[in-house]
Image (cartoon, helix red, strand yellow):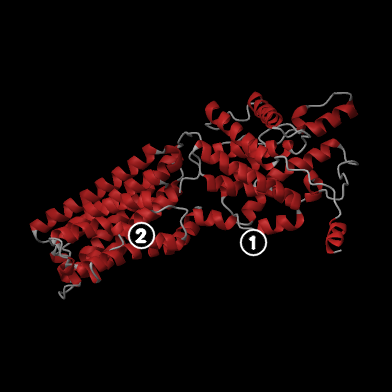
Amino acid sequence: MNRTKSQKIKKWSKKDVVKTVFLILLNLVLVAEIMLGAILLNGVGTGASAQDFFAYFKDPVSIRKFVFLMLSVLLIVGITSVHLILDNRNRFRDTENLKVVFAIIEVTLICCYFAGRYVSPYLRPLFLGVLLAHQFLGRRTAMFTNVAICLLVFLMDILTNSVVTDTFAIYSSLILGFAGGVIAIYFVNKEDSRIQVIIRSLVLAIPYVVFLIALNYGRVDLCWKELVLVACGSIISSMLYLMFMPVMEAMFKKTTSYRLIELTDHSAPLIKRMIEVAPGTFNHVTVVSNLAEACAIAIGEDPLLARAVAYYHDIGKLKQPEFFKENQIDGRDYHKDLMPELSTSIIRSHTKDGAELIKKFRLPKYFGDVCREHHGTMPILFFYDKARKYTDGEVNIKDFCYLGPKPQTKIAAIIMIADSSEAASRTLKNRSREEVYSLVEHIIQDRLALGQLDECEITMKEINIIKNTIVNNLTGVYHKRVEYPDLDLSKITKETDE
């Protein structure tokens, strides 16, 4: 899944290039070994001796087939790698993303081989790869990964002395596998429940079913076994997808929609702890999460990620919750007897403390990044003003600023604006739309003037959309209600009874 698509493009260092080239070559060898393994198993599995594997290379025709197979593997792996890197240089600068793509291709190839070799080519989980790629890396990458998988399965069928002799099954893996993969990308949603994924996977078999019935002149009774196997193959694809997803999530430190939903559940350890020791902060992040989700939808970012990140952006306040106003239920001001410099250190440390908690609980690194970024390098004006009064104005404002860095992604920018807007709106006595709009406009202009949004690729159009979305939602949250009359219900009930 693409979780940081709005990051600025960074230059590749020599180290990045070397790591990427080494990874591509390594996985080229692995895919070639899978093909060699298929040749070996196909030779041994027919009842002949293991020497048939070596005999494969004595026949000139077989040698040409083998050379063509290896060159084709080289071409497919090479083109796939180049396309992915050029399509999104910033994402695939992180070699973990390339590892995910190659792992998906290799796992799908192995599963398809064993299902086709030992059960039936119609039972192959051909859609496993496209479902995993869509979940972890998005639609564009999933589309190209699906093409690569279909081509490799086709090569495996025709160039490794495969025992699969059904011509339709071989060519359907190439053509209909691609068609079913496209359907999977647009029909199986990443946010679907597990049972929905399994049910929807049946739709992926539609191209197979249509062609099977058409080839048998509309007689379902002539191909009912193949139809059942195709349906089972689609279901097996979805079941393997659900099985491999948490494994790959843990191996490659990726975050899926399922994981994000789990992290926003109130039973999640840090959220549960926040509810218990910092209820005011929990109330704040709940509203900010709703604002962030709405803004992400409005500008085309990942709403589930925005919501989850918003829940954890102030998690660092758990370290010293009583020093933050929203948690001071008893009305005591814990900063009253502290020097403004010390108060500033306590307040701004919640960004660093949050990132450390995220790391300690092994949550996604992106959460920790937003913890550090959501205040950027903004000054803490309350304590800056307090310090000026103590020193007759001779104070360096940099000593009262957050340590940053500034927001690097659009979602981090959304959290910055939504966080400040929600907190400031609570101080308004008049929460009319005009007042809320003026407040949010002022907050955004301050951050633009201080260059807080300069390091993320967010446009003025998107900022205006975010502003209007936040105003609409805050106006809805703090809307006026009907004033209830002050009546004693016990007296009214007594009079009614009498």
Q: Nearer the viewer, residue 97 or 428?
A: 428
Q: Please name the residue shown 26% across and 47% down the image.
A: 76
Q: Please name the residue shown 81% across and 31% down the image.
A: 384
Residue 445 at least partly seen = yes
Q: Is residue 389 left or right of residue 164?
A: right
Q: Are marks 2 and 1 in contact (CB under 8 Å)?
A: no
Q: Nearer the viewer, residue 18 or 83?
A: 83
Mark 1 closeness class: few <14, some 14–19, many ≥20 residues within 10 Å = few
Residue 421 x/y as whole percent: 68, 36
Q: Amino acid at mark 2?
A: Ser
Residue 267, numbered label = 1
Residue 387 x/y as whole percent: 85, 31
Judged from the image, the secondary structure of the residue bearing numbered disc 2 is helix
Q: Nearer the viewer, residue 63 or 8?
A: 8
Residue 46 x/y as whole percent: 16, 73
Residue that label 2 marks: 201
Q: Please name the residue shown 17% across and 52% down the image.
A: 67
Q: Is residue 394 left or right of residue 139?
A: right
Task: Tell me the CA gap for discs 2 and 1.
Answer: 31 Å
Q: Along the polypeptide, which appears first: circle 2 or circle 1?
A: 2
Residue 62 x/y as whole percent: 12, 58
Q: Nearer the viewer, mark 2 or mark 1?
A: 2
Q: Nearer the viewer, residue 163 or 202?
A: 202
